[in-house]
Image: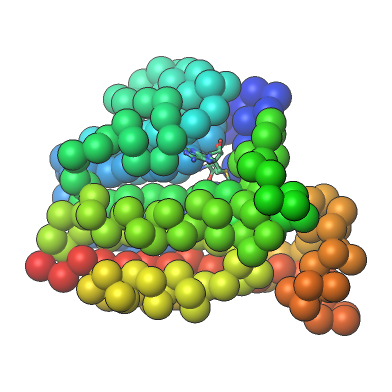
Amino acid sequence: MNPLVLPGVYAPQEDTDLLAGALSEEPLPPGSDVLDVGTGSGALALEAARLGTRVTAVDVSRRAVYAARWNARRAGLPVRVLRGNLFEPVRGRTFDLVLANPPYVPAPTGGRAPRGPARAWDAGGDGRLVLDRICREAPGLLRPGGVLLMVHSALSDPDRTVRHLRAADLKASVTRRRRIPFGPVLRSREEWLRRRGLLSGDENNEELVVVRAELPR
Ligand SMILES: C[S@@+](CC[C@H](N)C(=O)[O-])C[C@H]1O[C@@H](n2cnc3c(N)ncnc32)[C@H](O)[C@@H]1O
């Protein structure tokens, strides 16, 4: 069943699918606690709930929260959907798995915070506005043996993600990669990305990566 997507809510795309593939390979005993941060339509939260896990989903967007709740109800799956900024709604809790498909696209925003639907993908000049926060805060949300699975673009520096997570004593690496044609957002700022040196002259597709980071027991 495809999730309902309201206008202004991120429709599941290649990044969602790449992360769903990584999720399907995690050995998660039923009853494991999963957090899906930046849940959008709830697509990944529903996938995790289908595996018999207990899922909490968070999004900053009212519309996304409404859509994810509606999709969970429609699918008959017990997903708890909370509205808030990143990990604020789950302060003090810990999880066996944290899923994140955050905004990660470098954006010529001139230092302004992204607004409206672009909040789902724009993430500052280097694409790391939310990624760096997740790298800092997610390790504290994991139980021993717990895993962070996060997808983002190779344009937003996966090596830095891996370095930050290793510095927090997590076992981190890129575990999945997929090349996809530019979507409308990247096409609209191709020139800017080339000027910044984020794209080379003839590059016309984007690489997505999944970073897996595990807190040793
Ligand atoms: C790329 S979309 C991913 C949606 C969904 N997880 C998927 O994979 O299809 C990113 C989502 O993160 C949400 N988001 C952006 N900044 C956030 C923040 N600071 N706290 C919580 N959610 C945020 C957006 O509203 C959007 O729904």
Number of numbered callouts drawn: 0
Which residue occupies the foreground of this view, 193 or 65? 193
Instruction: Judge from the rendering whether residue 186 lies leftward or rightward of residue 115; answer left or right.
Output: right
Instruction: Judge from the rendering whether residue 159 lies leftward or rightward of residue 5; answer left or right.
Output: left
Q: Is residue 53 visible?
A: no
Indicate the position of residue 45 as horizontal and vertical percent values: 40, 38
Outermost residue on the left side: it is 217
Examine the rendered structure and indicate whether residue 135 appears above or below residue 110: below
Asked where in the image residue 12 lies, by quadrant, the reply is: top right
Examine the rendered structure and indicate whether residue 24 appears above or below residue 70: below
Indicate the position of residue 70 as horizontal and vertical percent values: 48, 18
Asked where in the image residue 203 lies, by quadrant, the reply is: bottom right
Which residue is drawn at the image coordinates 65% and 69% (left, top)? 155
Q: Quadrant of the C terminus?
A: bottom left
Instruction: Judge from the rendering whether residue 43 lies leftward or rightward of residue 103; answer left or right.
Output: left
Which residue is drawn at the image coordinates 48% and 74% (left, top)? 160
Which residue occupies the foreground of this view, 9 or 13? 9
Q: Is residue 179 visible?
A: yes
Examine the rendered structure and indicate whether residue 194 appears above or below residue 126: below
Outermost residue on the front side: it is 111
Asked where in the image residue 169 lies, by quadrant, the reply is: bottom left
Which residue is drawn at the image coordinates 65% and 54% (left, top)? 124
Which residue is drawn at the image coordinates 54% and 32% (left, top)? 41
Which residue occupies the foreground of this view, 161 or 113? 113
Indicate the position of residue 5 as horizontal and vertical percent values: 62, 27
For the rendered model, the colour scheme is: rainbow
